[in-house]
Image (tube, grey):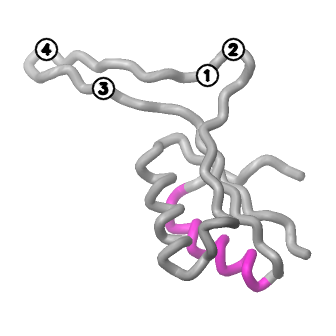
Amino acid sequence: MSQPVMKVFDQPDVASQARDALLASGFDPSIVELQARDDEAGPVEGNFVCLDHDAKPRVFHRCTLLLTVGTTSEDEARRASAILRDFNACAGPRQ
């Protein structure tokens, strides 16, 4: 059995696009999990508003998201890693 493929994202839209790419390429939704990660004190970085002098306020959402693919073979793990490579994710936690 292969180790799960884990990648960390800090932008929810990019994490969602990565998950969608895995599903579109045939990965079963039951093995693809996307979780927002916090510590006991809450998110390290929360949502905030950026005020530009001449523009409308912009809201930024920032958090840490962990995308896990429960692969069952080395080939499947390589395929998932190749798909995720295009989404600028960080390596996930070590097992």
Disc 3 and disc 1: Cα gap in Å?
A: 17 Å
Q: Position of residue 62 (x, y in %)?
A: 47, 32
Q: Quadrant of the N terminus?
A: bottom right
Q: Which residue is mark 2?
A: 41
Between the C-alphas of marks 3 and 2, the distance is 22 Å
Q: State if disc 1 and disc 4 touch (CB < 8 Å).
A: no
Q: Position of residue 20 (x, y in %)?
A: 47, 66
Residue drawn at (70%, 64%), measured in percent from left and top?
69
Task: Give the residue number, with chain letter if any, for mark 4.
Answer: 53
In this view, the residue in front, 10 or 37, is: 37
Write down the quadrant of residue 40 in the picture.
top right
Q: Which residues are magenta?
A: 75-88
Number of on-image labels: 4
Q: Is residue 83 magenta?
A: yes
Mark positioned earlier in the residue sequence (2 or 4): 2
What numbered label is drawn on residue 44?
1
Q: Is residue 78 above or below residue 45?
A: below
* Badge 4 amino acid: His
Question: Is residue 44 one of those drawn in magenta?
Answer: no
**Residue depth check, mark 3 versus mark 4: number of the one nearer the observer:** 3
Res. 59 mark = 3
**N-term mark: 3 or 4:** 4
Residue 57, percent across and down?
20, 20
